[in-house]
Image (cartoon, rainbow, N blue to C red):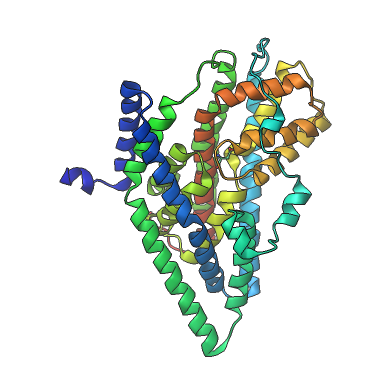
Amino acid sequence: MQRLLRLELHWQVLMAMLLGVAFALTFGQVSWIDGLAEIFLRLLRMIIVPLIFTSIVHGVAGIGGGSHLGRLGLKTLLYYSLSSFLAICVGLILANTLRPGAGVTDFGNTEFSPEDLEAPASLAETLIRLVPLNPVAAAANFDILGLIFFSLCLGAALSGMSGAQGDRMRSFFDGLFELVLRLTLMVIKLLPIGVFALIARAVSSLGLGVAAQVGKWILTLSLGLAIHLFVVLPLVFFLLTRKNPFAHYRAVGSAMAMAFSTSSSAATLPVSLTAVRDRAGVSDRVSSFVLPMGATVNMDGTALFECAGALFIAQALGFELSLPAQLAMVLTAFLASVGAAAVPSAGLVMIFIVLEAIGLTDPRAYALVGLMLGVDRPLDMMRTTVNVTSDTVGAAIIAHSEGEELNY
Ligand code: ASP
């Protein structure tokens, strides 16, 4: 037991995952496991709002001055767009060559209507909603983008505050951030137990009944996500830092495992922040800026999913997409990934935006989304892992470009 506890966190988490799978296969659905998984998720959600608020205010105040902030913001935006568009290209190429939708003839009798899902907001609406009416309400309603916006503004104001008052306020926020981080580390100590319960719950409730119809879709998406995770992102990382990308993956392994178990980039944020900071050696000022924003808007796996998913549906319906329609699809796949909430299955909801952009509003398209919903959980686990990994890769690349020394 002592030796087990001394193992590195990512090994503990990996063992917990295997144990979770074995447990679910042996005992099936067990109610106390569901309860344990729920408690762990609630603990994570409990710290997300304080963590985002304190880390961004403290991080942005530490960046100092508008031009530094602007430079970091620009780099972050460039990386987010580049990585998402690369992911979309992978999805586009794979779905066009493997044609996962080609053989689908039976759309199943999955009763499904888009009204069952929360309607996705349009882009203009998302942009307007970026500015919260009331920061306290934004925090209380888990409006992460609104909270980020307010925290960025407060951090920028704090960085410009001079004199003794300014120093006092800055050291207050430094202390507050350290405090919330301590709390985060306490929750992260429970990570192996949480992962065990989450994986056991996910495996025991997998709906694989419809897997045969969409088998090729599952394979295409898994292959696309694997190519982005193991070829494209490592290549981008290596080209921009000249460092071993897999050493980075080892450092952030616990965040990747967490993303896989929770299917939520937001719930993973506490783990990715601590892994990137403590194990990869990225400074607070960079990680506090890049990661919370990345968790909400940078979703490579989701972008790939939106594009390949829309093509899958189009192929199944025998709907040929012209070049302009494919271009519109690329753009809306990107926007849909930006707008997707960092919670389970959010990506599937956003696919309606892409379908609408390419004129696919046929009721059979909705039936197909219903079919996809049946097998979405494992795919969501994979795309969330890609989403979170890309955020951490971005944080390391930007830290490197700012002259920071990484730990590998
Ligand atoms: N679950 C994903 C995430 O939180 C979003 C998605 O459904 O694609 O990153």
Q: Nearer the viewer, residue 220 or 272?
A: 272
Q: Is residue 115 left or right of residue 83?
A: right
Taking the image as shown, residue 72 lies to the left or right of residue 113, namely left
Q: Position of residue 256 (x, y in %)?
A: 44, 42
Total marks shown come to 0
Percent of width and height locating residue 115:
71, 32
Quadrant where the image shows the N terminus: top left
- Residue 187 visible in the shown view: yes
Image quarter of the C terminus: bottom left
Q: In the depicted view, which residue is nearer to us: 101 or 365?
A: 365
Front-most of residues 132 and 101: 132
Relative to 375, residue 32 above or below? below
x and y percentages locating residue 194 in the rendered image: 36, 42
Q: Nearer the viewer, residue 312 or 183?
A: 183
- Please state the horizontal and vertical placement of residue 344, each as a whole percent of the image: 55, 38
Quarter of the image for residue 63 reads bottom right
In the image, what residue occupies the spot 52% across and 73% down? 62
Q: Residue at x 38, y 38 (%)?
A: 35
Residue furthest toward the left?
2
* Residue located at (72% from left, 33% from top): 352
Question: Ligand 1 appears in which quadrant?
Answer: top right
Which residue appears at 82% of the width and 26% of the height? 322
Residue 65: quadrant of the picture: bottom right
Q: Is residue 78 above or below residue 259?
A: below
Whether residue 244 is visible to the viewer of this picture, yes or no, is no
Hey, which quadrant is residue 327 in on the image?
Answer: top right
Residue 360 in the image: above or below residue 194: above
